[in-house]
Amino acid sequence: MVTTEFETAVEQWRTQGWAVVHDLVPAAEIDEAVDELWQHFPTPADYHSGNPEARSYFENESTDARYRPASQGAFHGQGGKGDEGPSFRLRQFLGHVLFPYDSHLLNRLQIHPRVVDFAKCAMGTDDIRLYQARIWGKYTGVTNYEQPFHQDGNHNIVPDRLELGWWNLEGFLYLSDVEDGVGPTEVLSLGDSPPGSNPQSAAGRRGSYLVYRTDVWHRGVNLTREGGSRFLMNIAFKHAHHEWIGFDSFQQHSNRGPWSKFAASCTPEELALFGAPMPGHPYWTSELVDALEVRYQGIDASPWREALGK
């Protein structure tokens, strides 16, 4: 189920429910972006050295960039509160930073063309929307990350329609090497269900992309390596106009500096991943194109302007 072959991975996702695409994003690009990751997370060395400031990242409720699961509940049902055995624990969901980030390279990585091309190919359409975008960092010892096997029912307000043309694509882009000891997701192939099935490890090098469907059983695994950590980027897509599927809202951040800089770097096709109307859409007028240039200083508005009279 782990492959570097683009077309093979597409077929595996469609027929087996999941795949890991090795080296979908070159490691050099991952490493360049990860240099800016420490604007949002403590370095593993700082955290595991006992640095009080680094440790407070998982303790201080006033940390602005941190995702707060206590306000939203455990996504798959409240599990046991102890540290033993597979369970959904609120502390498992600490270490999330929501898009857009205070890093231009990480923002650009969120819509890397290789990842977008894979999603379009797998889903069989060019008209897709990004609906989940965040970074998730885990460190050995923060909590027991062991989960029971589950399917993701929290991306859709109606039952999933399980056929090509209706699937959404869930995915994790690995920002670090995800190996045994640092929590590679365990996955069951399509048609298998717990208990009694043989899980497979979705381990992969940084730059790999784990893709899976909502009808696949999977689970988080505990980090056991001393001084271990694991970082990945949630990148999930749906078909355009499938309003019943969703997770993260981007509009609430669209007047922040990081978004403005990111949006100014985008092509019309890239902004369309967030729902922006394409050039030629009836939404656009010459005044609105002017306003687009004012809002996102430096954006190339020529595609919108050239499409006005067509």
Image: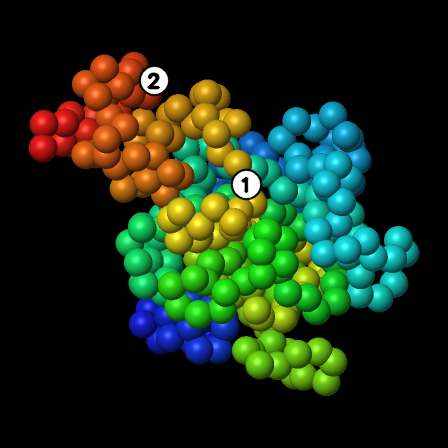
Dot 1 surroundings within 10 Å: few (below 14), some, or many (20 or more)?
A: some
x and y percent of residue 125 in the render?
A: 30, 58
The residue closer to the viewer here, 59 or 265, is 265
- Residue, x 74% and y 63% (percent of image)? 147
Marks 2 and 1: in contact by CB < 8 Å? no
Residue 193 seen: yes
Dot 2 surroundings within 10 Å: few (below 14), some, or many (20 or more)?
A: some
Image-based side of 216 in relation to 126, left or right = right
The residue closer to the viewer here, 122 or 83, is 122
CA distance for labels 1 and 2: 23 Å
- Residue, x 23% and y 34% (percent of image)? 281
Q: Amino acid at mark 1?
A: Asp
Q: Which mark is residue 248?
A: 1
Q: Amino acid at mark 2?
A: Arg
On the image, which quarter does residue 273 sit in?
Answer: top left
Name the secondary structure under disc 2: helix
- Residue, x 70% and y 47% (percent of image)? 93
Q: Earlier in the sequence, mark 1 or mark 2?
A: 1
Q: Is residue 142 above or below residue 197?
A: above
x and y percent of residue 212 in the render?
A: 51, 65
On the image, which quarter does residue 96 sit in?
Answer: top right
- Residue, x 71% and y 60% (percent of image)? 223
Residue 293 seen: no
Q: Quadrant of the C terminus?
A: top left
Q: Which mark is residue 295?
A: 2
Image-based side of 12 in relation to 248, left or right = left
Q: Is residue 216 above or below residue 68?
A: below
Q: Which mark is residue 219?
A: none
